[in-house]
Amino acid sequence: MNKKLAAALSGGAVLVLALSGCSSDEVDEGQKVDAWAKTFCDQAKPQIQKRADAQQTIISTAADGKPADVQAADSKAFQDIADTDKALAKAVESAGVPPVENGEKLRQDAIKELNATATAYEGLRKQVDALDPKDQQKFADGLQGVADGLKRIEKMDQDALAKIQSGELGKAMAKQPGCQKTRASVAPTATSGPAAKPGDAAPASPSAAASGSASAKPSAPAKPSTSAKPSASTSAASE
């Protein structure tokens, strides 16, 4: 799986403004862009951290753990990612119109796409909640379905902020500490252990299933599209 919002936040080239070669108007416009980026990224920072923590939860959930534990971890992670996308949409909205060409359209598109992605993650959470952890085979089959849904949502999540993260606005966002890639604050748990026994071990989490792994080892989803992303999104803002 591709990395999401959180992973992509560190991307983007840093804007190097040679003041001696810029007119006063260009400098003023650059300052406006930087100010918008700071406003947005300051609000985005806690959401990026929350997404990174959700991703780590999915990644570190032992594949040989109890199905009910895997279910609970994945369900919470998906809801957390949905919540971060909603919060990021509000951050884009409250930051105002970006001072760039077609700024209003970029803003509205980002808000719409982030909210749509949040809804999709909530759908995955409901799908996980509906699984029966008492039947290991059915649970495994259900997780595969969740993984398939994750793949479909990946592109949505990656594209949600792609437009406002392009051009001068994206470069300004990449400079902001609040939009930098972050490390999960959740300590990873050991995923190794004795081989899972039929009847008492859960199949790999959606992150592993989505990657096509047939083993009981959970694979780290570059992004928790359905297993904890934001990823991260693109160069700034983002599972």
Image: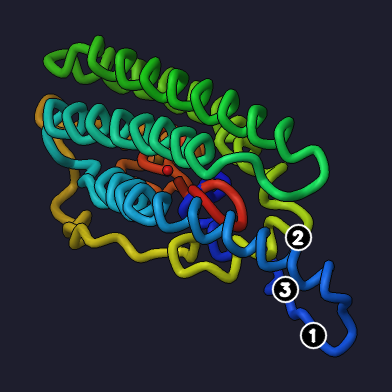
Give yes or no for contact between labels 2 and 3 (Cβ–Cβ under 8 Å). Answer: yes
Left or right of residue 113, residue 46 in this image:
left
Q: CA distance from mark 2 to mark 1?
A: 15 Å
- Does the rendering let one see residue 188? no
Amino acid carrying label 3: it is: Leu
Residue under the point 17% across and 57% down = 189
Whole-Å distance between the Cαs marked 2 and 3?
7 Å
Q: Residues within 10 Å of mark 1 (few under 14, many from 20)?
A: few
- Image quadrant containing the N terminus: top right
| Numbered circle sitting on residue 213 | none
Q: Nearer the viewer, residue 61 or 233?
A: 233
Residue at image position (60%, 30%) is 156
Query: Gap in Å between the C-alphas at discs 3 and 1?
Result: 12 Å
Q: Amino acid at mark 2?
A: Glu
Which residue lies under the disc numbered 1?
19
Residue drawn at x 88%, y 76% as measured from the top left? 23
Residue type at mark 1: give it. Answer: Leu
The numbered disc on residue 15 is 3
Question: Which quadrant: the C terminus?
Answer: top left
**Does dot 1 land on a helix, a strand or a loop?**
helix
Q: In the image, residue 7 lies at what x, y percent?
A: 50, 57
